[in-house]
Image (spheres, rainbow, N blue to C red):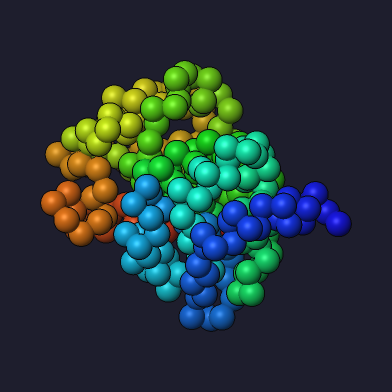
Amino acid sequence: MSFAAMLLALLAPELATAQEEMPPPSGKGRVVIVLSGQTGPGNYRATATRIAALGYNVVLYDSNAIVAASKSRTPTEIGSALIAEARQMPHSLPGKIGVVGFSLGGAIALRYGTTSGDDIAVVAAWYPSTSDIKDPKDFASRIRVPVVMFAGTDDDYKLCCTIDKARDIARAAKAANAPFELTTYPGIRHGFNIQGSNYSAPSTEDALARTVAALQRHLGG
């Protein structure tokens, strides 16, 4: 049994109920993992469905379950298990995968995805939590996967996703010549793709278009 298969067998009880496969119209497609924010998969299903409609096999995860599993597993184990599970979905094509994360899921995508160049082709982080990134220069120096990141300038949600930290990371990435692109939205707050007081259709459409462009550029489809 391969290392990835052993990890999947070990972690399946914790992760299997936290995923939902969204096949593309063609029946099979390259894999895109979508990681929800703390509010759970429901608020991110609409965006995930739109990505799937473009030809990708989307596997939507509840990031809360991933965080719970990480209390007893290493980041490498968690990342390997997620990738292995997504690749074994019935409608998945082989090859590298894309990762799209929102808020808490964005933090997971940045932490697990940006250094996994052997398995991950591109990371898209929407208003990710960056409070755990204490040293932007150190973080930027370890980026091995192309990253597109989206942040509202007025995001003050729990002070987890501030525009100042996002800009610090972008500056550090530029200095390190890392493949990192930050797009900011003036006056926009957290969760701008979720229906509610913070919703912004223009920001959502722009971020989705940039996400899809990055997927197509690095993953194909």
Write the residue at 52% across / 75% down.
23
Quadrant location, the N terminus: bottom right
Question: Does residue 98 show up?
Answer: yes
Residue 154, how many percent across, how many down?
A: 18, 35
Q: In the shown orientation, is residue 152 left or right of residue 64? A: left
Taking the spot 40% from the left edge, 59% from the top edge, the residue there is 41
Of 128 and 69, the residue lying toward us = 69
Q: Position of residue 123 (x, y in %)?
A: 50, 46
Vertical order, 102 against 169 (above or below)? below
Residue 128: give x, y in percent of width and height. 38, 40
Q: In this view, does 99 lie above or below 173?
A: below
Q: How many labels does the image show?
A: 0
209 over 109 or under it: above or below: below
Furthest toward the bottom, the residue is 26
Say if residue 100 shows up in the picture.
no
**Residue shown at 20% from the left, 41% from the top:** 189
Using residue 18 as the reference point, say whether residue 158 is left or right of it: left
Q: Residue furthest right?
A: 1
**126 to the left or right of 28:** left
Of residues 182 and 84, the one drawn nearer to the viewer in this rendering: 84
In-image side of 81 versus 20 (left or right): right
Question: Measured from the top left, where is residue 144 in percent x and y?
Answer: 59, 36
**Residue at figure coordinates x 77%, y 56% from the top left:** 5
